[in-house]
Amino acid sequence: MAEYEKAPHTPTTDNTNAKFLLQSEIESQSRIAETHLQDEKVIEDSHGMDTPTRIFSLCWWKRRSNRIVPAGLWPRVLYCMIALVLLTIWFLSMLVLPGQEPIRTEIHEVVNRYRPEGLMTLRGSLISFDMEKRILTISWEGLYRLNDTVGNIGFADPDYPDSRVREGIEIYRDITSEPYNASYVDADNSTHWMWTYQIDNQTAKPAGVIGMHPWDSFDTDITFTQRYSKNPWVQPLLGYPFDQWDGGIVFVANNVTLSKFFNLNGTGVIEINGIELTDYALNWKFEYDYQNSCGRLDPNTLTPFCHIEVNFIGTRSGVVIICAMITLVVNWTCASFIFILTCETVFMGRSYILQGTDILSMCFTALFALPAIRILLPGAPAYGAIIDLVGVLPCALTIAICTVCISIVKLKARHKVQKEE
């Protein structure tokens, strides 16, 4: 057969192979691009996608979120509502708890009261409470009981002349008075006897004198001690914020004019009808009760002593307790989260957590931030309370150990990469 001459532009075998390779490369790139498009589509789709092998990654969280709701709208609405509810609860708590009655009172009396006119009441105003010295400072003033209709008024009220005591009333603290059969001489030089009460310490000095002026007042420092001796969780300062404090004071009132009438110091003891406590101590709540031991000036109703005893119980306010508990939960949550990440990195070999400096920065930040949060606690005592041993020290130690472990693993990983390069 005749042989035909090849056309000058007919492709050779080499050109055919080059064309085939070029076409194969184009098809490969098309398949890769199609695969990327399918991956992106699956990420946007909420159904039919298995959980990725690499958990806790950005892609894993996105797919988990999209699997719940395709558009991702309801999860956002849900966590926004949760945040709003938490903020509302917090603000309502901060508004309601400080408005609770910071002072509660109970009355204990030995005899049945007959409430005559002229009985006096002491009204105290809280000034301060020193935790370190364990001293409660209260400023006291006197109230005069005019009658059942008007009630208590201030001494030396210009509108009520009978409320002024010309020579004043001496107030003694931490002493008592005992029955005394005093004598007096009338205008006819006749001697008469009358039962009264006399203070049991003639050398005691009064804490203050009231009744002569509207501004008469005196201050007292009341020492507080532990309320329960066998329960460390309520010990003062140690059991913060559940510590309970106990204190008390005893008052005796002596009318100077009546003492001069009997011509004997301390024989003009009069009854203190009651105690009122006002004002507000920041971060503290005080309960008090008083016991009036005076009886009628009659041999049949005289009591062994005549004084009024006031007992106080000091506890932390609700705001302090809530803040301390929230701080405790936050500390343990952060420490537990960092501990889990450290275990996942060290023991489970999830090296992608070490990428960048995020995990190391978080450890160092938490290491110095968590102990600083304790300083913000209202009324926090010096370091060493039970809350420090339960919620501050173990969390700080856990984070410190995790920081060291993360640093060692990260340095080893960097050394391995440099060695391979």
Image: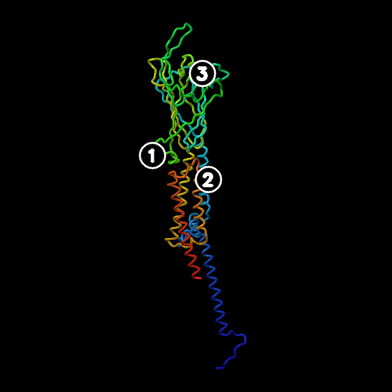
In the foreground, 83 or 392? 392
In the foreground, 111 or 341? 111
Residue 206: x and y in percent read 49, 24
| Residue type beneath disc 3 | Leu
In the rendered view, would you say 253 is above or below 44? above
Dot placed on the residue nearer the N-terminal end, 1 or 2: 2
In the foreground, 220 or 151? 220
Q: Which residue is mark 2?
A: 84
Residue 176: x and y in percent read 42, 23
Residue pushed farthest front? 203
Residue 258: x and y in percent read 48, 16
Real-space Cα distance between discs 3 and 2?
Answer: 54 Å
Dot placed on the residue nearer the N-terminal end, 3 or 1: 3
Q: Which residue is mark 3?
A: 146
State which mark lies toward you, 3 or 2.
3
| Residue type beneath disc 1 | Asn
Residue at 55% in and 93% down: 1
Q: Which residue is mark 1?
A: 231
Q: Are marks 3 and 1 in contact (CB under 8 Å)?
A: no
Residue 21: x and y in percent read 54, 78
